[in-house]
Image: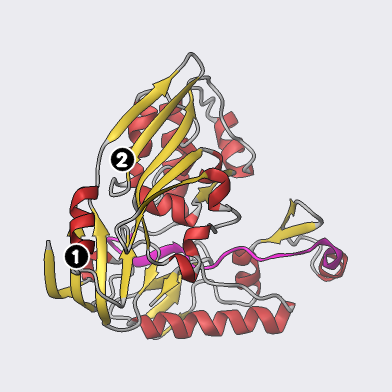
Amino acid sequence: MIKTDFSLLHYNSFGIDVKAKRFVEYSTVEELKNLILSGDISEPYFHIGGGSNLLFTKDYPGTILHSRIGGITVVREDVESVWLKVGAGINWDRFVAYCVDHDWYGLENLSLIPGEVGASAVQNIGAYGVEIKDFIESVETINSFGESHTYTNADCKYSYRNSIFKHKDMKNVFVTYVYYKLSKIRKFTLTYNALRDEFEALSVRTLPEVRSLVISIRKRKLPDPNILGNAGSFFMNPVIRKSRLPEFLKMYPNMPFYEQPNDFIKLSAGWLIEQCGWKGKNMGAAGVYEKQALVLVNRGGATGTDILSLSDAIRKSVHDKFGVDICPEVNIL
């Protein structure tokens, strides 16, 4: 499907009403190859998933691509594990629900994350002590020349909310299928305190119960983008050298932090923003969600530049107060 002057209102969770000069959607690998070889994908172009990690600041002057490649296939399995091949266009939470229904463990903490399967491999999505990199085996792709290539987990160079696919020189690589390895053995990840506390308090025992608990926690903390436009966590948690920790704890004894490898620590961007007084505050129609300072929201009628201006003001406040840079997690176009 190829459309011109296409509204992206329903393809970004901020609810920003912008247009793409051309919008191209495909349902199979073969269809994508044909679009490439026929010259229907011209510069500039940008590939989107569910639009849950995007901020459009103006109309897009080129081609927006969107995958509808589906299918969940069991590649192989044994007594302990199952290997899956999953189409990039599948809704992420529906895939998690499918895994829970089949008693496959690993992804339940990532329930209700918006977006699509392909984006999980690009963003290295994570929540409540789990990152998707620990379950991805490989990623199938096609580049803008119609060439296929499979990247192993190691090739993807995963790190916190990052992968090789986010690099500028990889923008011509489109994810088509993601391969995951999940467990058949009962095991839950409970390193996130709030999840563990409720897990124990409610005597949660089954995989569907864990998924329901995660969904409940997310709904309490994060706004529904269908009601209040947002992209979930707008900022990444900053990672700094551990040597800086004593100076922070001297001034802020209750500052939360998380140990990282190689003498680094991760700070809570939400906590930093809240200390700067931004939680629940608005700049025009753009605002900071009153229940979670990491989340920027469209109060109604905000433009992408309104959201970006709010982001810039918050980043300046955090830097001025703490000497720490926080970076947007969303893609800004």
Residue drawn at (56%, 80%), measured in percent from left and top? Answer: 314
Label 2 crowd bin: few (<14), some (14–19), many (20+), radius 10 Å: some
Secondary element at tag 2: helix
**Residue 181 % position (x, y):** 48, 31
| Amino acid type of the residue tagged 2 in the rendering | Arg
The disc at residue 221 is none
Q: Is residue 195 magenta?
A: no
Q: Which residues are magenta?
A: 225-245
Which of 302 and 165 lies nearest the eye of the viewer? Answer: 165
Secondary element at tag 1: strand
Tell me the residue that label 2 is attached to: 94
Image quadrant in which you'd find residue 128: top right
Q: How many marks?
A: 2
Residue extending furthest toward the top: 79
| Amino acid type of the residue tagged 1 in the rendering | Val
Q: Is residue 89 above or below residue 285?
A: above
Label 1 crowd bin: few (<14), some (14–19), many (20+), radius 10 Å: many
Tell me the residue that label 1 is attached to: 24
